[in-house]
Image (cartoon, rainbow, N blue to C red):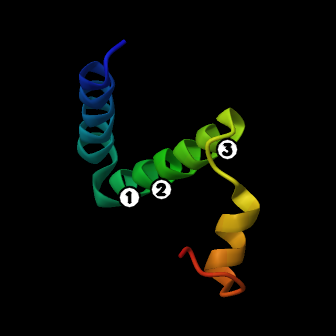
Amino acid sequence: MSLTVVGIGIGAFVAFMSLQFGLWGFLVALLFMGVGALLGRAAEGKLDLRSVIDALSGRRSSS
């Protein structure tokens, strides 16, 4: 499946959520999609969650 098809699917999902549940449904859907993307990248080994948490807490910088 190409990234274009994935993008179209995500756009359709977000549009459905905003039409069905209003602004809050749209925002909650975006939040869950972001969390899912982060967890998916962590499961693939492309993202180290410990370094992200350290950067957000100010222990380390990203540079």
Q: Which residue is mark 3?
A: 42
Q: Residues within 10 Å of mark 3 (few under 14, many from 20)?
A: few
Query: Can you name the residue that lies furthest to the top here?
Result: 1
Distance between the Cα atoms at labels 2 and 1?
6 Å
Dot label at residue 31: 2
Q: Position of residue 9 (x, y in %)?
A: 30, 25
Q: Residues within 10 Å of mark 2 (few under 14, many from 20)?
A: few
Q: Which residue is nearer to you in this view: 46 or 31?
A: 46
* Tag 2 and tag 1, C-beta contact below 8 Å: yes
Q: Position of residue 31 (x, y in %)?
A: 47, 56
Dot label at residue 27: 1
Q: Quadrant of residue 41?
A: top right
How many numbered callouts? 3
Q: Position of residue 14 (x, y in %)?
A: 31, 41
At label 1, the amino acid type is: Leu
Query: Can you name the residue that lies furthest to the bottom here?
Result: 58
Q: Residue placed at 33% from the left, 24% from the top?
A: 6
Query: Can you name the residue that lies furthest to the right here?
Result: 50
Dot label at residue 35: none
At label 2, the amino acid type is: Leu
Q: Residue placed at 56% from the left, 74% from the top?
A: 62
Q: Quadrant of residue 36?
A: top right
At label 3, the amino acid type is: Ala
The secondary structure type at the circle numbered 1 is helix
Q: Which residue is nearer to you in this view: 45 or 53?
A: 45
Residue 33 relative to residue 53: left or right = left
Distance between the Cα atoms at labels 3 and 1?
23 Å
Q: Position of residue 3 (x, y in %)?
A: 31, 25
